Amino acid sequence: MSIKLIISLIVFSLFWFFLILHFVRKKKISVRYSLFWLFSAFLILMVGLFPGILNGINRLFGFEVVSNLVVGMLITILMLITFILTIIVTKQKEQIRVLVQEVSLLESERKND
């Protein structure tokens, strides 16, 4: 990897890390959901600090070119994010359903009084 790419990865990962921490401090994102993003910043930093990691992973999985590995990893990360968000939305949908039922019962009781 070129020195420019290595420096770019390190700078980007540090920027990403501090941006996430800023949003956590401002309570725009919860700590629970920020952990995945902090982990991604850590991975980018590790690739920047130890560029040989990608070559080792590339040989392990048998990709022809490192760029194919990177694209595959990004697609996997995006699928994981989508899956996690689907779980969160499903849980919130169930909570909303329960809340609507409870409010309906309370309103029904109030009208009967």
Image: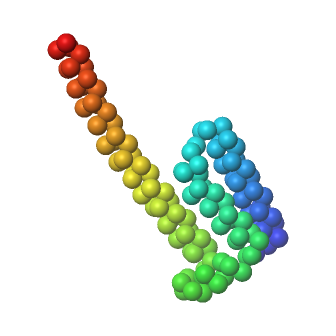
**Position of residue 40 measured from the top left corner of the image (x, y, whole percent):** 62, 61
Image point (73%, 76%), residue name: 51
Asked if 92 appears above or below 2 in the picture, the reply is above
Is residue 99 visible in the rendered image? The answer is yes
Location of the N terminus by quadrant is bottom right
Q: Quadrant of residue 110?
A: top left
> Does 48 sit left or right of 61 as displayed?
right
Is residue 64 visible in the rendered image? The answer is no
Asked if 103 appears above or below 88 in the picture, the reply is above
Q: Quadrant of residue 59?
A: bottom right
Residue in the foreground of this view, choosing between 54 and 110: 110
Residue in the foreground of this view, choosing between 76 and 4: 76
- The colour scheme used to paint the residues is rainbow
Image point (75%, 56%), residue name: 14
User: Count the marks: how many?
Assistant: 0
Image point (65%, 67%), residue name: 43
> Does 67 sit left or right of 108 as displayed?
right
**Position of residue 81 measured from the top left corner of the image (x, y, whole percent):** 49, 57
Residue in the foreground of this view, choosing between 69 and 23: 23
Residue in the foreground of this view, choosing between 86 and 76: 86
Location of the C terminus by quadrant is top left
Q: Residue furthest front?
A: 113
Image point (61%, 38%), residue name: 27
Asked if 59 appears above or below 73 in the picture, the reply is below
